Image: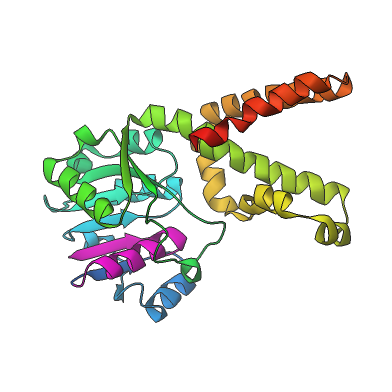
Amino acid sequence: MKVGIIGLGLMGGSFALALREHYSDVEILGYDHNDQHCIEALQLGLVDKISDDLESFYTLDLVILAIPVDGIIQVLGEFDTVSDRTTIIDFGGTKKPIVDAVPPRIRRNFVAGHPMTGTEFSGPQAALPDLYRGKVMVFCDIEESGEHQQKFAKMIFSDLGMKIFYMEAGEHDRHAAFISHMPHALSYSLANAVMKQENPKAIIALAGGGFRDMSRIAKSSPNMWTDIFRQNKENLLLAIQCFKGELEYCQNLVENDEWDALYTWMGKANGLHDIL
């Protein structure tokens, strides 16, 4: 299997490790604008070769786009004369802007995907062989992909131990705003609020597991998340507004000493863990 990975950070690097663990006959070609990432990916054995020419990817079996969402749109626009057997899968955190931007000449080659996994770390050194195992892979508008591409994409991610779900691209972006994008906005907000109010010594001394859990994803790449927030702006603003309503409700209960109502409100929130 000949595979190309564009973007050799956490997601692309981890995919490379997972492929090598599950397939003995895989050959991986890498591409990244960051020269240091290319060097590290070769040293770590994530890829066999590095290319700076997109034409090298046109005849591969599989091409993975593991780069920020604006970059995915740009790269897709540059793809041309791709083999009928090539499958191109993106890992973008938004789906509708990407699906809408796919050139018709490669639409059947393309599968819109979003692996629901990750960490707060970045770069080839952050790659993990089991990052995808047991996680969810969402495919969007897959009926618009070619028959071969559909079957191939399902096979790859099933082999990697992922659970596959299907959604319409716009539906995905609405759900992702609440479940993924808004929590990142909250984590960034929490981190900035605390740093403006507290000195470093107090943070180190008093920050327990709860604060660390809630602020962990504030270490995520601003480059990637600025693009995602921009592409999913309307859905994100709706999610933030809904959260603000809940936070203001909590504030009002505390201000008015409505402790029984606060207890009930917290109990309703506990129900989320029954779903998770």
Q: What percent of the width, then of the height, locates residue 113?
A: 33, 44
Q: Nearer the viewer, residue 143 or 157?
A: 157
Q: What percent of the width, then of the height, locates residue 25?
A: 18, 72
- As drawn, the residue found furthest toward the bottom would be 43
Q: Nearer the viewer, residue 258 or 107?
A: 258
Q: Is residue 66 left or right of residue 276?
A: left
Is there any visible trace of residue 245 in the rendered image? yes
Quadrant where the N terminus is found in the figure: bottom left
Residue 258 position (above or below residue 178): above
Identify the coloring: rainbow
Q: What percent of the width, then of the height, locates residue 214?
A: 67, 47
Residue 263 position (above or below residue 157): above
Query: Is residue 16 shown in magenta?
Result: yes
Q: Nearer the viewer, residue 128 or 40?
A: 128
Q: Is residue 46 left or right of residue 123?
A: left
Q: For the point 26% across and 43% down, which residue is it?
A: 111
Q: What percent of the width, then of the height, locates residue 49?
A: 29, 75
Q: Is residue 264 left or right of residue 181?
A: right
Number of callouts: 0
Is there any visible trace of residue 232 in the rendered image? no
Q: Quadrant of residue 251?
A: top right
Q: What stretch of residues is rendered in magenta?
A: 1-24
Q: Quadrant of residue 73?
A: top left
Q: Quadrant of residue 189?
A: top right
Query: Is residue 144 shown in magenta?
Result: no
Q: Is residue 87 left or right of residue 121?
A: left
